[in-house]
Image: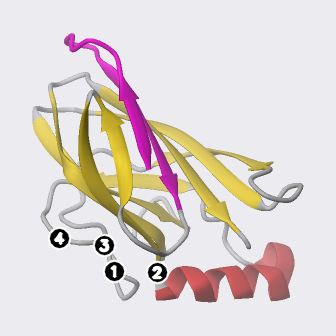
């Protein structure tokens, strides 16, 4: 997951990229470096298999939500850690090339903070409420003021 941020103002916008390939912690670049974990959950693996076998009959995982709770993302996770009050956003979907043509699903969405809070994790889900947590990432807390936003770019590579 890679993050870049502009100088801090009341309406700061931060950009976060999450690579959804299970493995060691990734690096978050925000002028300082912190470690994050990104995992495709067990439910996410089942979701992908279902989407392939059932085509358009499976719900689309394009909802991005964030949370304020502590924890380390793990494949058994089913919820975002202390999901924040802001509604999940429906991200813009596309396919991009990482290694071979169109091998990566990309979902981009921006969440705006309704209050002063510290965001510690993000998830990709298949519903605007409840739903299945397909990808989960945790990171060092990002303090936000009311009106601050983070643009998340979630990439789910099939390799």
Residue where numbered disc 1 is placed: 74
Crowd rating for badge 3 (residues with CA inside 10 Å; few <14, some 14–19, many 20+) = many
Whether residues under marks 3 and 1 lie with C-beta atoms below 8 angstroms apart, the answer is yes
Where residue 43 sits: x, y (%)? 51, 85
Closest to the observer, 55 or 87: 55
User: Is 146 placed above or below 21 here?
Assistant: above
Q: Which residue does the numbered mark 4 point to in the structure image? A: 71
Separation (CA) of disc 4 from disc 2: 15 Å
Calculate the distance from the C-alpha at mark 3 to the C-alpha at mark 4: 6 Å
Q: Nearer the viewer, residue 117 or 141?
A: 141
Reading the image, the residue beneath label 3 is 73
> Residue at (26%, 24%) from the top-left corner?
148
Residue at point 21%, 14% (across, down):
8
Q: Earlier in the sequence, mark 3 or mark 2?
A: 2
Q: Are marks 3 and 4 in contact (CB under 8 Å)?
A: yes
Residue at mark 2 = 41
Q: Secondary structure at mark 4?
A: loop
User: Picture quarter containing residue 81?
Assistant: bottom left
> Residue at horizontal 63%, vertical 62%?
156
Crowd class of label 4 (few under 14; some 14 to 19; many from 20; radius 10 Å) = some
Tell me: 79 left or right of 99.
left
**Label 2–label 1 contact, CB within 8 A:** yes
């Amino acid at each position: 997951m890679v993050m870049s941020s502009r100088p801090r103002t009341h309406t700061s916008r931060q950009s976060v990229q999450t690579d959804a390939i299970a493995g060691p912690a990734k690096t978050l670049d925000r002028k300082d470096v912190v470690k994050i974990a990104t995992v495709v959950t067990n439910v996410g693996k089942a979701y992908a298999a279902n989407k392939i076998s059932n085509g358009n009959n499976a719900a689309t995982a394009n909802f991005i939500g964030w949370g304020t709770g502590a924890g380390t993302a793990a494949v058994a996770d089913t919820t975002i850690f202390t999901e924040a009050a802001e509604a999940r956003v429906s991200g813009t979907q596309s396919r991009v090339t990482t290694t071979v043509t169109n091998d990566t699903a990309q979902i981009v969405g921006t969440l705006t903070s309704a209050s002063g809070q510290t965001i510690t994790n993000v998830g990709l889900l298949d519903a605007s409420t409840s739903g299945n947590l397909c990808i989960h990432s945790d990171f060092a807390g990002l303090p936000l003021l009311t009106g601050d936003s983070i643009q998340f770019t979630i990439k789910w590579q099939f390799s």
